Amino acid sequence: MSLQDRLTELRDQGLADIQAADVLKKVNQVKVDLLGKKGPITEVLRGMRDLAPEERPKVGAYANEVRDRLQQAIDNRRAELEQAAVNKQLVVEKLDVTLPGREVPQGQPHVITQIITELEDLFMGMGYQIVDGDEVEEDYYNFERLNLPKDHPARDMQDTFYITKDVLLRTQTSADQPRSLENHDFSKGPLKVLSPGRVYRRDTDDATHSHQFHQIEGLVVDKHVTMADLKGTLTLVSKTLFGDQFDVRLRPSYFPFTEPSVEADVTCFNCGGKGCGICKQTGWIEVLGAGMVHPHVLEMSGIDPEVYGGFAFGLGPDRFAMLKYGVDDIRNFYLNDVRFLSQFYKKG
Amino acid sequence: MRISTQWLQDYLKLDIPADELAEKIERTAVEVDGVIRPNEGQKKVVVGHVETCEPHPDSDHLHVCQVDVGEDEPLQIVCGAPNVAAGENVIVALPNSWIGNHTKIKKSKMRGVKSNGMLCALDELGFDEKLVPKEVADGIFILPADATPGEPVFGYLGMDDEIIDMSVTPNRGDMLSMNGTAHELAAIYNQTPTMPTVDLHEDAADDVNGQLTVRVDADKHDVPQYKMRLIKNVHVQPSPLWLQIRIWNAGMRPINNVVDATNYVLMQYGQPLHAFDYDQLTDGQVNVRLAKAGEHLTTLDGEDRELLATDLLICSDDQPICLAGTMGGLDTEVTAKTTTIALEGAVFDAVKIRKAAHNHDLHSEASMRYERGIDHGMTVTALDAAAAMIAELGQGTVAKGVAVGRDEDVQPFEVTITLSKINHVLGTTLTSDTVLDIFKRLDFPTKLDGETYTVTVPSRRWDIHLPADLIEEVARLYGYDNLPATLPAGQPTIGKLNETQRVIRDSRKMMESAGLTQAISYSLTTEEKAKAFALSASDVTKLDFPMSSERTTLRLSLVSGLLDDLAYNNARKEHNVALYEQGRVFYSQPDQVRPKEIEHIAGAITGSMVKKSWGVAEQPVDFYQIKGIVAGYLKRLALAGTVSYVATSDMPEMHPGRTANIFVDETLVGFVGEVHPTTAKAYKIRETYVFELDLSALIALPKAQQQYQPISKFPSITRDVAMLVDDTVTNADVVALITDKGGAHLQNVTLFDVYNGKHVPAGKKSLAYTLTYRDQNATLIDDDVTAAFNKVLEALTEKLGAEIR
């Protein structure tokens, strides 16, 4: 048998062996057996010594071709088997991906905080500073400086917890506004503040009353601030909190610290303005009070009402949350039932 | 204030549905609670004429009536009312009719006799019991003799009226009258109202002088006006039906013609009036003064009231006969026997009346108006109107003249404002004519000079005295819907959180990412709970007049409220709870009523923070879990000082062996630990771990400078050490010693094992640490590390008696 034939035989046998190897180990063995230093191909190449010199290159080239061919076949077979093994493992490793993941404990902000934060962000974007007044305030700042002298009938609207005759738990976060007014340096620009916080009223707790609740009061004072600016600002607030489809309307009202005073209604979120039980068939829901700062309030803070003017507004995050989410009992906000708190996981 | 739209027709030509009118009032003037339709939902209730009325054969009180209801045949109706009689016109609810309170009337049999409907009393037609005249309360209502059988009954009773129920704000006292409301609607609809006129006939021969003397001893501020008229030979009797209808549709009970006349005029003019029985006065003498503390007066409602020094009194011979502006006295009440009336028309100080109404809990139609102020210019007119009406209804005569205790010169008020100021405040571009037209509609005489309006405000609008008040009038009548909507222009400002606000917001987020949910608890609690868990001793701040014993005192800690929250959850079978709260606590300050308000942050965990799931067991919370939360949080605050945890057994509410005070260097900033089992039991909660931190203090403490540290290019070398030490030796002792003796290159000490089980002798524990060494600038030499490590081992053995393993 010529060397060429021997090589062809080795090639065909080798290819068959490679194909027959069904595990990696066998492939490796075939490789050692065929292409190793003591293997038959090496032996063939060694036999080339006996060939005529002109034959040698031909046989050499053929031998290399056979070796490359076998090497190629081994690599392919190996890749095939590795792939098969991986595939098999993947099948074994298949999971039910619908099983729940391992939960990382995660808390969430209180729904009232969510509303306050949303409004703080909105107003900071419009250049307002956030101010936090004291919860225990002087009667003088909570009432008198807001144009509510002692024995004013409008004091009936706010039953008050007193500590002494002159010190009380603030009934409104606007108690901080006189301080903001007297401390502001108008040469540095307008006063724009938002005061969120806890307030207290002498009420018996029930589904719609709470002796503790929250308020957000806004105040803007500058040389030219208009009632149209107030209307625009309140419209923005409602659209931010409730959605773009909500409209705002103003109605006359009365607060001693503003003149004119208005109440703002928003399109009923329940019926979209058609009229329903929640809005008493009016299509509107009262959400906040506002007005142009009363000249007396400015004067008492040493600001000339002939030069400066502004607007103020106040709203209740508790009421907003009740309206927005249909919460039917205000006490839910302060009892901290985890089944209640965990329902509001939107924003922080 | 209830406004009858039928009554309004006397003033204005308004062909407008009541709902629309109500909406207009609400959008332009004051809030409206709703429109009341007394006959709403009622059907087939007609006038009937009782033709015959026979006793029921099987009853001692029922009657069998044949009632003409305008049909061919009379209806047989059985009636139990004591006042039913032949010849009367009555209210008949026909078969299948609907009467008040959604009640349907059907044919029936009463003790064997057919009854085809029902004869009705007023309350059966939905009248509030408080509005039904007392004389007709016990029987069916008798309609006028000229009523036509078969016609719907509603028109005869004013039940076809539509009544607008207004909620009048304190500034719009002028709208607590028909006249005021008519003026307002006239302005809204640009009409000229027809106001009531007074047709008073005095008896020229009978002068009030010498019969009635009135003296005011109170000052001018408290009693600006006090006047009386005398009406004689009055027959006190029920009012005619038309007047009763107006009274009950206004939400008052008809009493008699004298009282009803004063209430009618009150409704018309908003001027409270009071009628005294003249014969009960001493010598026709009346004086007005402040009460002396300790005096008594029995008021109309039969209550004996102890008077206060702030009460204004009407007296006769200096004996109290009436609490001014709130309620009359029983002794001088107008009764069926009264023939001579002393009628008071007065103005009293709003604050005095407000106090009296508040102190005696007597809120009447009169006090409500005095508190908000009344039209000082209308007192005499109203007095005259009521005197004329009483005389007419009671067939009496009015004595000549007015007894004046105090008179007042009432002038209209002038306010000036410019067009540019109005437009400047409203953000509008109103023309001069538009504004002039609004003042004209309000019937405010106005002079325009250049762009300045001089507006003469009549006394009926005493709420207006500033330019801003006029701006409101212009704005509301121009219509808020017509205002543009803009945002403030002017110099831009920057809105951002200050440092404290930023840290508070970040702290909330950190707590939430550590698995705690935000709670908001009550700041007011019991004194005992307020003091519990306080970081330092402090007096508490207490309410002067609390609403309930549960809410008397401002809290000194947040933990106490969180435990209340846990108890609430525990009672509802929610045993896995992890809450935090951020809020203020209130520490008293020397010589000040107002406490210092300090921001705190606190947390409480109970049960398991990990939800039981497939492959995940519940992990009961423990001390190290809450400490881990606190430590992680404090780390992120990047404090410059060193945080340390020092065991404390000083807090009575906390477990003495599982509580640590938290220090930053030398400053106490909070505590962490387990709630004392006894405290937990008292709060009705399970095993609970808590922390509380003084956030204000943490915010004030210096923060570490944030500076980039190059990451060492050189490898680190670690050494592990395990040792046996006495139980009393703490981790802190060991770490402190290792750190102290570790040498220049010791970077980190990490505890990786604590063991005190098998193979560890009693009273000992095994601790194991990894020490990491690194040189920023060079590769460490193994021998150097070994030398440094050996020094640590020596120190541990020597100083802590550690047995290195």
Image (cartoon, coloured by chain):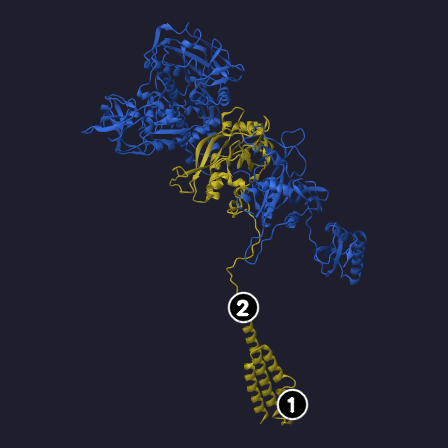
Q: Amino acid at mark 1?
A: Arg
Where is residue A63 drawn, in percent x and y? 60, 87
Q: Quadrant of residue B261?
A: top left
Q: Is residue A306 left or right of residue B556?
A: left
Residue sitting at the far front = B58
Place of residue B429 in the rendered image (x, y in percent of width and height, measured from the top left): 44, 34
Looking at the picture, tell me which residue is in the foreground, B389 or B755: B755
**How many numbered callouts?**
2
Q: Which residue is mark 1?
A: A46
Label 2 vs label 1, nearer the camera:
2
**Could you tell me if residue A301 is visible in this image?**
no
Figure quadrant of residue B494? top right
> Could you say which is closer to the camera, residue B622 or residue B772?
B622
Q: Amino acid at mark 2?
A: Val
| Chain A drawn colour | yellow
| Closer to the camera in the image, A81 or B524 | B524
* Chain letter of the blue region: B
Chain of the residue displaying label 2: A
Relative horizontal placement of residue B173, taking residue A137 as reference (left or right): left
Give coordinates of residue B558: x percent, y percent: 61, 40
| Residue B587 position (above or below residue B1) | below
Label 2, label 1: how many angstroms apart (C-alpha)?
49 Å
Q: Is disc 1 placed on a helix, strand or loop?
A: helix
Chain where mark 1 sits: A
Residues tagged by mark 2 and mark 1 found on one chain of the structure: yes
Say if residue B461 shows up in the picture. yes
In terms of sequence position, does the residue under pointer 2 or pointer 1 come before the other? 1
Q: Where is A208 relative to B749, above or below?
A: above
Q: Give the number of the disc on residue A92.
A: 2
Image quadrant where one finds the N terminus of chain A: bottom right
User: How many residues crowd mark 1 within 10 Å: few (<14), some (14–19), many (20+)?
Assistant: few
